[in-house]
Image (cartoon, rainbow, N blue to C red):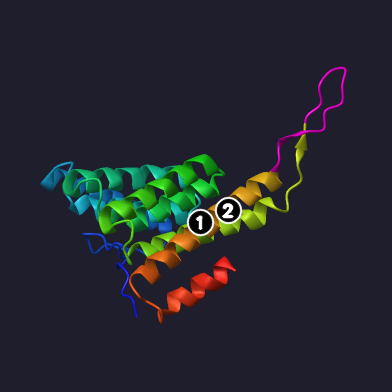
Amino acid sequence: QTEYFSQAEVPVPDSAAVTDTPLSSIAAYQGNIDRLIAEHGSYTQKLFQDYFALGQSYQALNLHEKAIEAFTDANYISRINNGLATEATFELIRAEIDSHLALGDFSSANTRQQYLYYLGREVHGDDSLELVEVLSYLGDWQMTHFGSNILKRSVFSFSTGSFNNAPVSNPRLIAFGNLLQAQNYYFKAINNLLKHQELSDPALYELENKLI
């Protein structure tokens, strides 16, 4: 069975002061960030874990704009210390996508998805087995939005003096765009598995069912 890349673990803050509620955790993480900056400077790699955990605590309170700020800080620390293409930021980007979606900012969510795909290819290679998990995740995301958009009604426009019922924004067209993109991701993931002769990998059967 294929061993895919290990996703970034849920960060454990440098301090031991992890508290029971998201609100108290925010204070603990922020205090630890201030301490780390004072002791090690503003760009120490140690900050990555606490910024990530801070963002997750904000998410738990549905404070998604604050969460994105914390995730952005974590990503900045990772880029300074590890460069642009690093595996450590995979889970960070997924968390950021979740917050963009919670805010209804589908454009930013899609942009970060494309960056996640780019990152996977840069770190592991376009035909790698490790990219399969990323492709499956991206396909699932597109299928989720296919299901949502296909149920929406079209928005019609009207022009002065004439009746124009051509849709300005047709959710069904968007939905089938989601479907096509999902199929492309699933097909690419299957192709990567076949290139490496992973014919008995459970992921192959799962992806085939998704594609069908």
Q: Nearer the viewer, residue 46 or 101?
A: 101
Vertically, is 83 above or below 136? above
Q: Residue at x 87, y 21 (%)?
A: 162
Q: Residue at x 66, y 54 (%)?
A: 148
Residue 105 placed where, x, y %? 53, 42
Residue lying furthest left in this view? Answer: 39
Residue highlighted by disc 2 = 180
**Could you tell me which secondary element the residue under label 2 belongs to?**
helix
Residue lying furthest top in this view? Answer: 161
Residue 44 placed where, x, y %? 16, 47
Vertically, is 88 above or below 5? above
Q: Which quadrant is the C terminus positioned in?
A: bottom right
Q: Which quadrant is the N terminus positioned in?
A: bottom left
What's the mark number on residue 184?
A: 1
Magenta span has 159? yes
First to last magenta residue range = 157-170
Residue 70 placed where, x, y %? 35, 46
**Could you tell me which secondary element the residue under label 1 belongs to?**
helix
CB of mark 2 within 8 Å of CB of mark 1? yes
Q: Residue at x 42, y 47 (%)?
A: 114
Left or right position of 141 against 84: right
> Is the stretch drawn in magenta largely helix, strand or loop?
loop
Q: Nearer the viewer, residue 198 or 33?
A: 198
Q: Amino acid at mark 2?
A: Leu
Magenta span has 100? no
